[in-house]
Amino acid sequence: MAYSETNPLANEFGFDVDGPLAAGWIALLRVVTGWWFFHSGVTKLIESGLNYTYAPTYLRGMTGTALGPLPVLMGENLAWLVRPGVPLFETLIGLALITGALVRLASVGGAFFMTLFWVGNAEFGHGLVNGDLMGLLLFGTMIVFGAGRYFGLDGLLETTGIVENYPTLRYLLG
Amino acid sequence: MTQLDTVERVALALGAVSTLLGIVGLGIVEILAGQPYGAAPTTNEAGEVVATPAVDPAVRTGLVIVGLVVLFGLGLYRMVTDGRAATDGQTRVTAD
């Protein structure tokens, strides 16, 4: 590749979004984020099974947040769903990101979880930008880039007949 | 990349402005207002609160959440308009 006077990095060391290094980096981010959630979910499953009783307690404690009464209502009325849902969905979201299947759909779920963690933990001792917000932004990054297409199963799923017939499905894959 | 229509441009701007206002804009206000400089109160060794944030953290987190919800809505809007375009036999947008 020719040397570029205006952009010396525009060669094999370039970081173009459609280049191999960027694709590898996005895939790496996806798998690490997936492992983060998978580990969190599967260890809850090992310890508590499908009865993670802390989840509704945590939600009921989320008073006075930007989410208003929504988390408290969830903790009080949806405990039957939240107790098995937290470990189960954390595990499934993690698996989806690790394998790269249904990444956008899974990342919407991950972003929902991270919003509750970010607002609920309210550990802003070092500022509003903390690890939970970064996790939330990571899931946003997965959605925007369609991270499952990079060394993930979504790249294969999008070549199937059903996705070609219903291209809107690509908004859930990718 | 396909062109953004007016609704999409407004949503993109609104989402970005709201998110950045919550994090950066009001973050600057917190710094200028003095201690605690951030979104958590400052306590002394006895654990008593000696300085509280100038802006309620719920306001800042709320602005960020609103911004991200708007951007999510933009994604849903593109999904719906893409679906309609596909049904009508057009190729206005793609999922890329």
Image (cartoon, grey):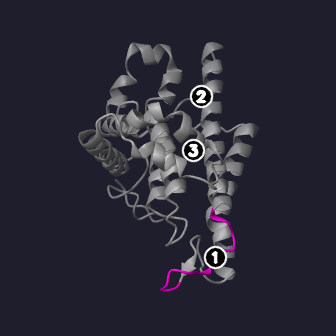
- Identify the residue under disc 1: B52
Q: Is residue A71 left or right of residue A33?
A: right
Q: Position of residue A124 (x, y in %)?
A: 52, 67
Mark in the foreground, 1 or 2: 1
**Residue at disc 2, secondary structure:** helix
Please rate how many residues cluster around mark 2, counting C-alpha atoms within 10 Å: few if below 14, some from 14 to 19, many from 20. Answer: many
Q: Position of residue B66 (x, y in %)?
A: 66, 49
Q: Quadrant of residue A10?
A: bottom left
At label 3, the amino acid type is Pro
Which residue in the protein does label 3 denote? A71
Q: Residue at x 59, y 28 (%)?
A: B79
Residue span colored magenta: B44-57
The residue labelled by disc 2 is: B79
Dot 1, crowdedness within 10 Å: few (<14), some or many (≥20)? some
Quadrant in the rendering for residue A74: top right
Q: Main secondary structure of the magenta part?
A: loop
Q: Residue B7: where, in percent of width, then height? A: 74, 38
Q: Chain of mark 2?
A: B
Q: CA distance from mark 1 to mark 3?
A: 25 Å
Residue appearing at x 47%, y 49% in the figure: A58
Of the two numbered discs 3 and 2 in the rendering, the one whose residue sits closer to the viewer: 3
> Quick check: is B49 in the magenta stretch?
yes
Q: Are marks 3 and 2 on the same chain?
A: no
Callout 1 secondary element: loop
Whether residue A18 is visible to the viewer of this picture, yes or no, is no
Is the C terminus of chain A in the top left, top right, bottom left or bottom right quadrant?
top left
Identify the disc placed on residue A38. Answer: none
What type is the residue that disc 1 sits on?
Thr
